[in-house]
Amino acid sequence: MQVQVNIEFDQLVQAVKSLPPNQLKQLLSKIENQAEKSLPEMDLEDLLLKGPVATEKQMAVIENNRKAINQWRNK
C-alpha cells in the first residue's frame, strides 16, 4: 500500500521538529545514508581530467587579453 501526501515545506519542517530525539536521529541517519549513496565518488584528478579544455583559438584570445591588460597597467 502506498500513500502520497502533498504538504508544504514549512509543514514538513514542523513535523520533523516535533519528532522525539530517537526518531530524529533515525531520520537523520537514513537521510545521510541516502545522500552518500546518491553521490558518486570521484577522484579530484579524474574530475579535472574530464573538465573542459580550451582550444588554441581560445588560448590565443586569452593571451592577447593578458597582453592588453599588462599594457594598460603599465601606462
Image: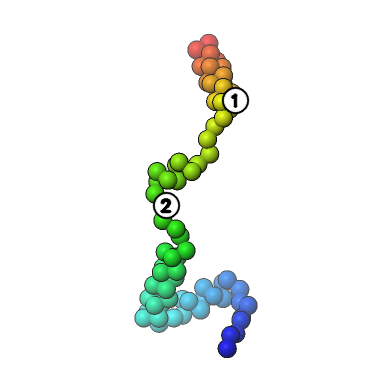
Q: SS for tag 1?
A: helix
- Dividing the picture into quadrants, the one containing residue 29 is bottom left
Residue 59 in view, yes or no: yes
Residue drawn at the location 56% of the way across and 72% of the way down: 10
The Cα–Cα distance between marks 1 and 2, rounded to whole angstroms, is 30 Å
Of residue 55 and residue 15, the one placed in the foreground of this image is 55
Residue sitting farthest toward the right: 6
- Dividing the picture into quadrants, the one containing residue 45 is top left
Residue drawn at the location 39% of the way across and 77% of the way down: 26
**Number of numbered discs visible in the structure rendering:** 2
The answer to whether residue 36 is left or right of residue 54 is left
- Identified by mark 2, the residue type is Met
Of residue 53 and residue 72, the one placed in the foreground of this image is 53
The answer to whether residue 37 is left or right of residue 53 is left
Residue 59: % across, % down? 55, 25
Q: Residues within 10 Å of mark 2 (few under 14, many from 20)?
A: few
Residue 57's disc is 1
The answer to whether residue 46 is left or right of residue 14 is left
Residue 28 in view, yes or no: no
Q: SS for tag 2?
A: loop
Q: Which quarter of the rendering shows the N terminus?
A: bottom right
Note whether 7 is above or below 73 in the view shown.
below
Residue drawn at the location 37% of the way across and 76% of the way down: 25
Q: Assess whether mark 2 and mark 1 are in contact (beta carbons under 8 angstroms).
A: no
Of residue 31 and residue 42, the one placed in the foreground of this image is 42
- Identified by mark 1, the residue type is Lys
Residue carrying label 2:
42
Residue drawn at the location 41% of the way across and 56% of the way down: 41
Note whether 44 is above or below 66 in the view shown.
below
Residue sitting farthest toward the top: 75
Q: Residues within 10 Å of mark 1 (few under 14, many from 20)?
A: few
